[in-house]
Image (cartoon, helix red, strand yellow):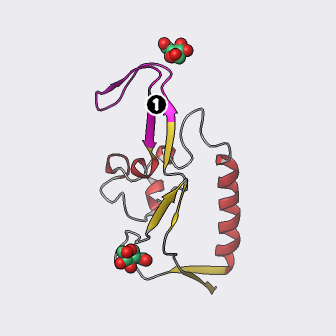
Amino acid sequence: MFPPVPIIVRKTMKEITLPSGTTLPNNTGIIIFVWGVNRDPTYWGPNANSFDPDRFLTTNSNLLASFSLGPRNCVGYQFAFIVIKVALATILRRYKVVGEREDSDVPKINSTFSIMLRDRDGYEISLEKR
Ligand SMILES: *[C@@H]1O[C@H](CO)[C@@H](O)[C@H](O)[C@H]1NC(C)=O
Ligand SMILES: *[C@@H]1O[C@H](CO)[C@@H](O)[C@H](O)[C@H]1NC(C)=O
């Protein structure tokens, strides 16, 4: 939901017609808004802005653009997923992670963007021993 790199820049290598019908000529610079792709209700359903990890039980996670997509995706993609799984398994075996109380399932985390996306005001969590 909060991709560290919220926009990526690419150049077309041939003429491309988008699903909208717009045609991009070869050699056109394009900006892909990863934040928007990851929250597009077309792909993620009406609750696209909600924190709902269970969506990956029914939605194709290959649509997630956080590590970019295609042949020039992030070289750290697979390494990042291994690190995430090991870190989560290690933490969740011993602790329950508790965030700030939210009044809805849409996270209210203010973010700021300068090269990388980051939280602006912090987001406190606490660990409760299991
Ligand atoms: C697209 O443009 C590049 C750079 O001008 C060129 O090398 C390439 O052959 C073009 N591709 C096609 C499919 O025309
Ligand atoms: C987000 O920013 C708004 C406006 O500056 C502020 O009112 C709100 O408390 C901030 N939310 C958090 C979670 O820090």
- Residue under the image location 52 percent in, 75 percent down: 122
Q: In this rendering, is residue 39 above or below 121?
A: above
Q: Quadrant of the C terminus?
A: bottom right
Question: Within the magenta stretch, is there residue 27?
Answer: yes
- Residue under the image location 43 percent in, 52 percent down: 35
Hey, what amino acid is under mark 1?
Answer: Gly
Viewer-proximal residue, 130 or 41? 41
Q: Secondary structure at mark 1?
A: strand
Q: In this rendering, is residue 60 above or below 3?
A: above
**Image position, residue 52 (x, y; %):** 43, 64
- Residue under the image location 38 percent in, 64 percent down: 50
**Image position, residue 125 (x, y; %):** 55, 80
Name the residue carrying label 1: 29
- Residue under the image location 49 percent in, 58 percent down: 113
Magenta segment boundaries in residue numbering: 10-32
Question: Within the magenta stretch, is there residue 55?
Answer: no
Q: Residues within 10 Å of mark 1 (few under 14, many from 20)?
A: few
**Image position, residue 116 (x, y; %):** 55, 56
Q: In this rendering, is residue 71 above or below 58?
A: above
